[in-house]
Image: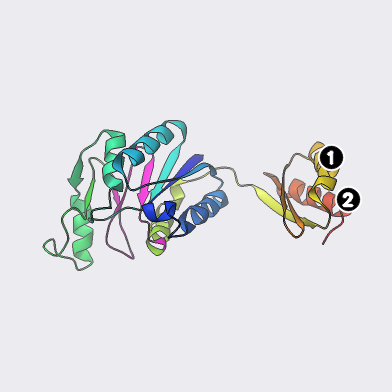
Amino acid sequence: MNVAVVTVGDELLAGRTTDTNATWLCERLADRGATVERVTTVPDRIAAIARVVNEYRAEYDAVIVTGGLGPTHDDVTMAGIAAALGRSLEEHEEALAWLEEDGYSRAELTEGTAALPEGARALHNDVGVAPGATLEGVYVLPGVPTEMRAMFESIKSEFSGTTTHLVEVVADEPESALLDRLAEVQDRFDVSVGSYPGESVRLTVESTDEEIAEAAAAWLREHVETA
């Protein structure tokens, strides 16, 4: 399952807020065997959200969008999703019923709190107020990390794929000196190899077969200087 992640927020683009949502989602999706092929941040503008979501939903099995939910002036994500899907925004009766069960009367809720694209399935916000939504392979989650994580947990079963096994080896050699060993381990084993330099070089070997991944890592440990 190929997935794109879109995070929404002017504050992300200005560097005022760190985008932890994308990293967390990528980790959880990888754990489930789904492949994230695109992570994009867009501003709080309906046209920008609609353009990116419309492009990605044609390319990927699912698009997860986080941020910009609620009734305030800069919460325009639902409108952007509706525009991308050619739907109108409507008050969602099921979402309103959930909120009432949580102790919110309709009179207390700001207008637009439960406005979702027509035909969407509402996603209940167990630790917040504004509901999420899913429709046509697009999943819309809150931007508040605690709310986003709780909501994703409620839908994680809808994301799947072939689980891969990753093993790490730390090498105490310059990355440029490792090129021959990196090429050879890929010739010997059916693995993907990553190389990430820093104070030392972190090497990763990844395979859908755990035994092959472990064997490739063992071969590397024998053939590189380890930290």
Residue plotted at (17% across, 61% down): 109
Q: Dividing the image into 4 quarters, which one contains the C terminus?
A: bottom right
In terms of secondary structure, where does tag 1 sit?
Answer: helix
Q: Is residue 173 left or right of residue 210?
A: right
Number of other residues with Cα within 10 Å of mark 1, as a class: few under 14, some 14 to 19, many 20 or more: few
Q: Is residue 117 magenta?
A: no
Q: Earlier in the sequence, mark 1 or mark 2?
A: 1
Q: Quadrant of residue 180?
A: top right
From the viewer's perspective, is 138 left or right of 184? left
Are the residues at dot 1 and dot 2 in contact (C-beta closer than 8 Å)?
yes
Q: Residue tagged by mark 2?
A: 223
Highlighted range, magenta: 122-145
Q: Residue furthest top?
A: 58
Vertical comparison of 153 with 44: above or below:
below
The residue that label 1 is drawn on is 184
Q: What's under tag 2, amino acid-wise?
A: His
Q: Amino acid at mark 1?
A: Glu
Q: Residue at x 24, y 40 (%)?
A: 119
Q: CA distance from mark 1 to mark 2?
A: 10 Å
Specify whether 188 is left or right of 127: right
